[in-house]
Amino acid sequence: MRLKVNGQEVEVQEGTLLLEITDPPHLCYHPHTETRGLCRLCLVEVNGRLLPACATQAQEGMEVRTDTEDLRTLRKTLLEWLALFTDLSLAPGLQGLLEAYGAHPGRWGRVPETRKEREPIRDNPFFLRDYAKCINCRRCVDACGEGIMGVWALTLEGRGLLAHPTTPLDRPLPETPCVFCGNCIQVCPTGALRPLSMEV
Amino acid sequence: MEKPSLLPLLDARLPLSEEKVAEAARLAGVPLAQAWGVVRYYPRYRGLPQGRLLVDDPVARARGFARLLEGADGTHPPLGLEALSPIHVRVEGEERYVEWEGRLIPFKEFRLPFALGQGNRLLPPEPILELDQYEALGGSVFLRRALKNLLAPEAILQAVEEAGLLGRGGAAFPAHIKMRAVARGEPPRYLVVNADESEPGNFKDRFLLEHHPFLVLEGALLAALAVGASQVFLYVRDEFEAAILGLENAIRQLGEAGLLPVPTEVFPSGGLYICGEETALLESIEGKRAEPRLKPPFPVEKGLWGRPTLVQNVETLANLPLILREGPGTWRQTEPKLFSVTGDVARPGLYELPLGTSLEDALQRAQGEPEALKAVLLGGAAGVFTRDFTFPLRYKGRLPLGAGAIVAFGKEVDLWEVLLGLAEFFREESCGECFPCPLGTAVQVEMVRRRERNPDLVHSLGQTLKGSLCGLGQSAYWAYQSLLEVEGAA
C-alpha cells in the first residue's frame, strides 16, 4: 500500500505501524510490552487528526505529517512538563530530547505538587523502586502482568498526576508473587526501577 | 455477563479489609493485582470524605467559595444539584445525605424538586414513576408494537436516521450510525446506557432518571431491539441513589407486565467524571480501573467484553419513543433539547427547548437578563465562557453545546474563581493514564491561580492538552482559553 509521509510517497506492507516508517520520539511503546498510545510523544497528524504512531497502522492513501509546528509545540511542552514534575536524571535519552526540542521547563513557573518528592522504596535485596523518577508509562506493570511474565506482582496506585505502580495490597515485593525476574527493570525507561548493584 | 464483575463484589464488602479485597478478587476470577489497582482507583473504595461537605460546583464558586467553605469539613464533586447550589451534603460512614430545607434527606430519597423541570415533550408536567401512569399517557405503545412484531428493528433504525438524532451526551455523534454499526456486528451485542452524568452544571439526565424512568427504559429497550442487543446495562452514577431505586422498580414493573424483552440491569457507576467516557465506562463494567481505551477499535465493533456495544446517553435514548410518536419529520422540525440553566437567573432549573433557540431566549425562560450578566459558561466544565447571547443553541455551531449546561454569572462574579474551580475539577478527575492530561491539568491549576495571560504559555498548554487520549484532557483548557477571549472582548 502507498501513503504519504511529510509529502513523500512511501510504499509499505499491510500492518506496518506508523512508528516503523516515521521517527517521532516515544516513551511508553516497547516492542516487548503492550503499552502504547499513552505518552503521546509519538503523536503524528494523519489526515488532520492526531494519532499515536505506535498504535496506528499504515493505511492506503494516508497523509501523515510527523513534524508540524503544532506537534513540535506539543512534544516540547510535554517534555518540559515531564522535567518539571519528575526526576529525569537517570534518563539520558529524555534529556537529549529536551535539548533537541529546545525545552525550558522553567517557563511554567513553580508547581507545588511534584513526583520528585517520593522516597525510594528499598524492600528487597535486588532492586530499588524510585518513583520520583517514574513517568507512569506502565511498561513495568505490563511486563509483570499480561505482557511478558503473567506474575501480577505490580499494579497501579491512584489517579492523575500521582498515579504510579505499586504492589498488590501495597506489600513489600518479597511478600508478593514477584519472582525477581528483572523484566520490569529491563523495560523501565527512566531508572525508576534499577538494580541495587548500581547504587553506590 | 461473561464472569462476575469485580465492582459489585467489592461494593458488597464495604468497608474493605485486605481479606475482603482478596475474596472479591477470587470470586471475580481476577489477579489480586487487578483488584488492588481498582481499590486504589475508585474513591469509594479508598474511603469517602466524611462530614459536612460543600458541593463544589461553578455556582458555589461564584458565591464566595472561601466563605462557604468555612462552615464545611471539605468539598464534594458536583452532583447535579447546581439548580439548588450552593448546597451541602453530609457523609457519615457509607450513608449520604443532602442538606435541604433544614433537613437531612438520604440520597436514596432525594430527587430534584419537580418544579425544576419545564417542558412538555420529554418532560411531561408530572413525574411518572408507575407503569400504569406511563401507559395512561400513551407510554409503552411502541414497545408493545415492537414486541408484537408490528414495529421492525429496521423501522426503528430508519426513524432514528430520518430524525437525524445526535447524541445528547456532548459529542453529538449521529445516533443511527452507531446503531447500524452495532446491528451489523456479530452477536452477542450489548446496549449500555450512559447515565453517569458528572459534568459540572448538568443535571438533565439526573432529572430524567429520577422522574421519567419508564421513558428512559422504553427508549433503551427500543434501541436494544433495533440493534439486536441481548442485554442492557444502565451505568448510573453511584450517587443518584433515588434514580437507581426508581429504575430498578420500573424494570421490575416492566418485567411483570411482560414488557421487558431484553434482560436489563442497573450497574452503579464507579463515581468519577471519567466513568462517563464511553470506553472508560466499559472498562469499569468489566471490573477494571475506569481508564479510556485507545480508539480504534470503537465500542460499536469491540465494546463490552470485546462485543459490539451501543453506548448511548440517557437523553438520546429518551428521544426514541418521542421520535416514533411524533414521526421523525415532525420531531426534527423542532428537536427538543434539555438545558440545565443555573447561576444568576431567577428560576434555575431544567428547560426543554427546541434546538436553535438563542442563548438569550434560554436565559429569559429562566428569568435571567443577559444585560445583567458578565458571561455564561456554556456546556459545563468542558465548555466555554461566552458573551455571545445571540448564539443559537444547536450542535456543530461555533460554540460547544456539550450536554446542555448553561451557567449564568452576574457582573460582580469573579470568573477567575469559577475557572479555578473548573481547573481543580479537571486536575482531580484526570485518570492519569496518558501523559498530557495529568501533567497539563496540574500545570493549568497553577496558571489559573496566578491568572496567567501569557499567550505563548496558554497556546502551548492548549496544544499539548489537545493531544490527550480522551475528551477529558482534550477539552480541559477550553474554559481557560475562552475566558481570556471574553476578557479581551470586554
Image (tube, rainbow, N blue to C red):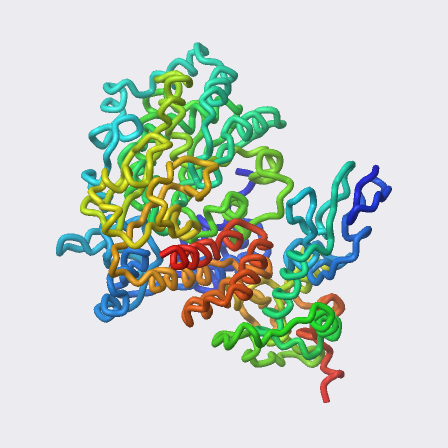
Name which residue lies at 41% across and 30% down: B317
Res. A157 visible in picture: no
| Quadrant housing the C terminus of chain A | bottom right
Judged from this view, the residue extending furthest toward the left is: B102
Which of A148/B433 is in front? B433
Residue B346 shown left or right of residue B487 in the figure: left
User: As drawn, which residue projects farthest toward the bottom?
Assistant: A200
Tally the marks.
0
Q: Is residue B336 left or right of residue A129?
A: left
Q: In this view, does A41 lie above or below A127?
A: above
Q: Is residue A105 above or below residue B473?
A: below
Q: Position of residue B81 (x, y in %)?
A: 27, 50
Q: Can residue A165 be seen in this view?
A: yes
Which residue is situated farthest in the front direction here? B489
Residue drawn where x is 42% and y is 47% of the image: B269
**Residue A5 % position (x, y):** 79, 47
Classify residue A57 by image quadrant.
top right
Q: Position of residue B95 (x, y in %)?
A: 28, 56
From the viewer's side, name the closer residue of B82 and B220: B82
Residues A56 and A70: in front is A70
Q: In this view, does B394 lie above or below B224?
A: below
**Residue B434, how many percent across, how many down?**
59, 58
Residue drawn 83% across the image and 37% down it: A1
